């Protein structure tokens, strides 16, 4: 049994990552993925991007830039599962299953939707003016992202906590309706990195694209210098003592400096280092730490087919988890094969175990026999004849005890043995594959439920 913590997070692909994204989300996520106990799933939330953006060019560019940023930043794709949401068809399919159990009233309360409604009302418009079903259902898609992989921890910004709570709510409801005592979905927890300060932008407010105050991350050294030169400082002249604790330039420096570098810089500012020179120091620090990654970024961007390959491998890894799980969920809601009930029974171990049952009856000659019926009602076994009910009962008891089953295959059927004697036989099967599937179903049906 693995006890690794599954950490999952998505990045909406609408922009170009800046320094604040890097320090606040990307760098901590890459570090967290290096922990031996972490089983990380990181993905490009490009279906979510479509909700906010209808510019195909921008969607495409952003997906590449974000992928390249994470890879250049040191994400090890052999350790983590790194994929594009839109490469996993199981996600929209699960979204629908969840949509059918999600309460509309729950989604009415989503912050993002409510904010849009409020804005419409303020402007005297229809409450739902310009609001798409994509925006409205955004939390259900996000719930599918999270629940599909049974994530334990979901690192997100504060604005996303509500969505993780909704994922719990929707997942719980599904468990309750279809789990029959089994918890299909793990309850995820939002993980808010308190220690990671949000970086201030050029003007001292939170660094954010919407404030137009960002420092670019990997575009070019020149872009970075230009942005740094626009950091707002006070008007103290060179030679005058500066106040590091009231300078967001210093805060930016701190986010990338070692303790020793930070102390040295603080001392110099107190001694009157000029702001121009201080900006120069900040650039040197950032360039030293990010210069190599910038090189890697441009290499990746110039060879998109390498990234495509890496992401397709990631998608394959993710689907190896998602596809069998979704098959189980489809079965649970009643989307089942018409023709192969035995195989279906084999995929739902616990349910089959629960529902399989022994039915005893008496023959005309007075002997006792029993049948073992699987969950769906088909006959798995018919016993031989026993002289009395007690013996027949003891045999059924022994078969359910969890001891290793002695199953012996014949051409088109099989029999079950106990203490050197045949006690029951299967029906005849069309071929050896269906015989083997039935043996598997029998083992599942006779596995004791441990809970
Ligand atoms: N909505 C998230 C954001 O904008 C992105 C996201 C999509 C996500 N799916 C997710 C985050 C699943 C965590 C888990 O930040």
Image: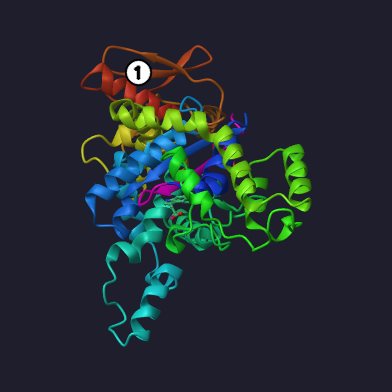
Q: Position of residue 437 (x, y in %)?
A: 33, 25
Q: Which residue is mark 1?
A: 414
Q: Nearer the viewer, residue 176 or 133?
A: 133
Which stretch appears magenta? 1-16
Q: Position of residue 448 (x, y in %)?
A: 54, 34
At mark 1, the secondary structure is: strand
**Image-based side of 273 in relation to 412, left or right:** right
Q: Residue 403, relative to residue 253: is it above or below?
A: above
Whether 13 is among the magenta residues is yes
**Image-based side of 280 in relation to 351, left or right:** right
Q: Position of residue 371 (x, y in %)?
A: 38, 34
Say few, some or many: other residues with alpha carbon within 10 Å of mark 1 (under 14 / 14 to 19 / 20 or more).
many
Whether 24 is among the magenta residues is no
**Image-based side of 159 in relation to 252, left or right:** left
The residue lying at 45 percent from left, 70 percent from top is 111
Q: Nearer the viewer, residue 406 or 333?
A: 333
The residue lying at 51 percent from left, 27 percent from top is 79
Q: Nearer the viewer, residue 32 or 342?
A: 32
Image quadrant in which the N terminus is located: top right
Q: Position of residue 94 (x, y in %)?
A: 34, 49
Q: Residue 146, relative to residue 164: is it above or below?
A: above
Residue 104 visible in the picture: yes
């Amino acid at each position: 049994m693995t006890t690794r913590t599954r950490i999952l997070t998505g990045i909406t692909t609408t922009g170009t990552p800046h320094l604040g994204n890097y320090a606040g989300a990307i760098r901590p996520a890459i570090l967290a993925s290096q922990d031996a106990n972490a089983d990380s799933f990181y993905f490009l939330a490009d279906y979510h991007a479509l909700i906010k953006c209808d510019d195909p060019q921008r969607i495409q560019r952003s997906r590449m830039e974000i992928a390249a940023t994470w890879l250049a930043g040191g994400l090890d794709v052999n350790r983590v599962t790194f994929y594009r949401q839109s490469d996993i068809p199981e996600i929209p399919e699960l979204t629908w299953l969840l949509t059918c159990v999600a309460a509309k009233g729950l989604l009415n309360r989503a912050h993002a939707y409510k904010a849009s409604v409020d804005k419409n009302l303020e402007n005297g418009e229809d409450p739902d003016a310009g609001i798409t079903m994509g925006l409205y259902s955004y939390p259900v898609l996000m719930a599918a992202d999270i629940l599909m992989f049974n994530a334990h921890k979901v690192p997100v910004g504060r604005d996303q906590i509500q969505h993780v709570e909704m994922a719990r709510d929707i997942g719980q409801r599904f468990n309750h309706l279809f789990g029959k005592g089994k918890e299909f979905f793990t309850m995820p927890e939002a993980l808010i990195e308190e220690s990671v300060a949000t970086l201030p932008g050029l003007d001292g407010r939170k660094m954010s694209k919407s404030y137009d105050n960002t420092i670019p991350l990997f575009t070019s050294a020149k872009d970075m210098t230009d942005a740094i030169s626009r950091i707002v400082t006070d008007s103290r002249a060179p030679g005058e003592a500066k106040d590091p604790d009231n300078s967001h330039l210093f805060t930016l420096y701190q986010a990338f400096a070692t303790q020793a570098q930070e102390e040295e810089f603080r001392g110099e500012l107190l001694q009157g280092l000029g702001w121009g020179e201080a900006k120069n120091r900040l650039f040197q620090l950032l360039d030293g730490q990010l210069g190599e990654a910038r090189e890697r970024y441009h290499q990746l961007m110039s060879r998109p087919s390498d990234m495509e390959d890496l992401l397709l491998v990631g998608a394959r890894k993710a689907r190896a988890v998602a596809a069998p799980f979704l098959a189980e969920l489809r079965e649970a809601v009643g989307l089942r094969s018409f023709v192969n009930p035995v195989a279906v029974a084999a995929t739902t171990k616990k349910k089959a175990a629960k529902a399989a049952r022994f039915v005893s009856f008496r023959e005309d000659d007075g002997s006792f026999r029993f049948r073992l019926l699987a969950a769906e009602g088909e006959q798995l076994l018919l016993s031989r004849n026993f002289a009395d009910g007690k013996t027949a009962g003891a045999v059924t008891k022994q078969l359910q005890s969890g001891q290793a089953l002695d199953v012996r295959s014949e051409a088109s059927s099989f029999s079950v043995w106990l203490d050197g004697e045949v006690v029951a036989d299967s029906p005849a099967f069309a071929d050896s594959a269906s015989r083997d599937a039935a043996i598997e179903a029998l083992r599942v049906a006779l596995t004791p439920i441990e809970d």
